[in-house]
Image (cartoon, rainbow, N blue to C red):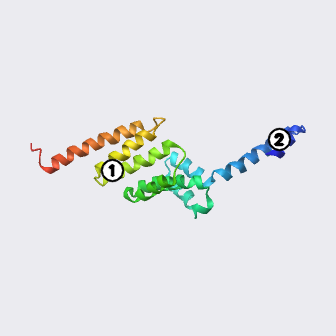
Amino acid sequence: MGAGVALCAFGFWGWGILVVFLGGFVLLSYFFNENMIIAQWFLRKEKSDKAEEWLLKITDYEKQLNRSQHGYYNLLIGLIESRKAPLKSEKYFKKALSLGMKMSHNTALAKLSLAGICMAKRDKRQAQMYLQEAAKDDKNKLLTDQIKMMKGQMSQMDKQQVVRGGYRQF
């Protein structure tokens, strides 16, 4: 980066800009693993099989990633696993929360996913707790629609339990 600035200072603008971009790319790839960036891009395009391929290229995440990225790695693995087998992805979401993530909407996403898993297990108390925590963590209101939908599904779960219990007869 310094060489690029020096080249610009000596009047070699073209080479200076090129070296600054190359230095920025190297600096960016040090702080953010390129495999994770590409996997996130494929997840946004809803191509989870290709995202999984890129994440599997990270063989030992504790050595290959910065400590701040460990939670995000487990979150991405959990999101991919939740599409295949939702109940098996619980351990990845819990590990992501225990390792910590800097962005609050990612923590809210992990807690919302855990709430869905708890609903699938018919653990209403735990699901409500995760939903409340997800609503608190969603400071930018990115997941409000999903939280409202999950609360609606939880109320439907109550009605189904009453009908199955035999309290309501038609």
Which label sits on residue 20? none
Q: Which residue is located at x 39 percent, y 40 percent?
A: 146
Image quarter for residue 137?
A: top left
Q: x, y percentage for residue 139?
A: 47, 36
Is 53 above or below relative to 162? below
Tell me the amino acid under the disc marked 1.
Gln
Q: Of label 1 and label 2, which has the lower sequence position?
A: 2
Is 61 above or below relative to 138? below
141 left or right, relative to 24 = left
Nearest to the observer: residue 99 or residue 51: 99
Q: Nearer the viewer, mark 1 or mark 2?
A: 1
Kindly state the secondary structure of the residue where label 1 is placed: helix
Tell me the amino acid under the disc marked 2.
Val
Q: Which residue is located at x 31 percent, y 52 percent?
A: 120
Kindly state the secondary structure of the residue where label 2 is placed: helix
The answer to whether residue 62 of the structure is visible from this angle is yes
Q: x, y percentage for residue 122?
A: 28, 52
Q: x, y percentage for residue 131?
A: 37, 44
Where is the C terminus found, in terms of image quarters?
A: top left
Residue wearing tag 1: 126
Image quarter for residue 133?
A: top left
Where is the N terminus found, in terms of image quarters?
A: top right
Is 149 above or below relative to 101? above
32 left or right, relative to 94 = right
Image quarter for residue 128?
A: top left
Circles 1 and 2 in contact, beta carbons < 8 Å: no
Residue wearing tag 2: 5
Q: Which residue is located at x 16 percent, y 46 percent?
A: 163
Crowdedness of circle 2 by 10 Å Cα count: few (<14), some, many (20+)?
Answer: some
Q: Which residue is located at x 44 percent, y 57 percent?
A: 81
Q: CA–CA distance between discs 1 and 2?
A: 55 Å
2 left or right, relative to 44 = right
